[in-house]
Image (cartoon, helix red, strand yellow):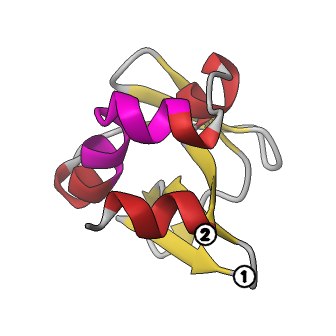
């Protein structure tokens, strides 16, 4: 799944990693198929990426990333993106 949280001035987008009934609170992906929860030190296999469609669409939009000033490979790798609300609104047009 992809989580989208709005505040007064930004949109936070993040990939969710779910293991059983619990969500990984501090996920760190290892390649494309594995993830470690840095909070619990649990290791898991990524089995279903279908819920990341929105994440993939946003990450593939170079104009959006450039406009938002997102160039931090570490945060993108970890599945975190913070987009200023004005930039996000322009991308919807």
The quadrant in which residue 23 appears is: bottom right
Q: Nearer the viewer, residue 18 or 61?
A: 61
Q: Nearer the viewer, residue 15 or 27?
A: 15
Which image quarter holds the N terminus?
A: bottom left
Position of residue 24 relative to residue 77, above or below, is: below
Q: Residue at x 61, y 46 (%)?
A: 80
Highlighted range, magenta: 55-66
Measured from the top left, where is residue 53 in percent x and y?
21, 53
Residue occupied by mark 2: 85
| Crowd around label 1: few <14 · some 14–19 · many ≥20 (10 Å) | few
> Chief secondary structure of the magenta span?
helix
Q: Residue at x 23, y 47 (%)?
A: 49
Residue farthest along the right direction in this orientation = 39
Residue occupied by mark 1: 7
Which image quarter holds the C terminus?
A: bottom left
Residue farthest along the left direction in this orientation = 50
Q: Are marks 2 and 1 in contact (CB under 8 Å)?
A: yes
Question: Is residue 85 shown to the viewer in this render?
Answer: yes
Tell me if residue 13 is in the magenta stretch: no
- Residue 79 placement, left or right of 20: right
Whichever of callouts 2 and 1 sits on the residue coming sooner in the sequence is 1
Q: Nearer the viewer, mark 2 or mark 1?
A: 2
- Residue 71 placement, left or right of 29: right
Measured from the top left, where is residue 33 in percent x and y?
34, 25
Kindly state the secondary structure of the residue where label 1 is placed: loop
Q: Nearer the viewer, residue 18 or 55?
A: 55
Position of residue 30 relative to residue 10, above or below, is: above
Measured from the top left, where is residue 51 in percent x and y?
24, 60
Q: Residue at x 35, y 47 (%)?
A: 58
């Amino acid at each position: 799944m992809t989580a989208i949280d709005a505040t007064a001035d930004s949109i936070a987008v993040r990939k969710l990693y779910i293991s059983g009934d619990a969500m990984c609170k501090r996920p760190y992906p290892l390649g494309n198929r594995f993830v470690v929860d840095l909070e619990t030190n649990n290791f898991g296999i990524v089995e279903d990426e279908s819920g990341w469609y929105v994440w993939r669409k946003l990450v593939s939009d170079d104009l959006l990333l450039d406009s938002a000033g997102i160039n931090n490979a570490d945060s993108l790798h970890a599945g975190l993106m913070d987009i200023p609300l004005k930039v996000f609104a322009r991308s919807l047009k």
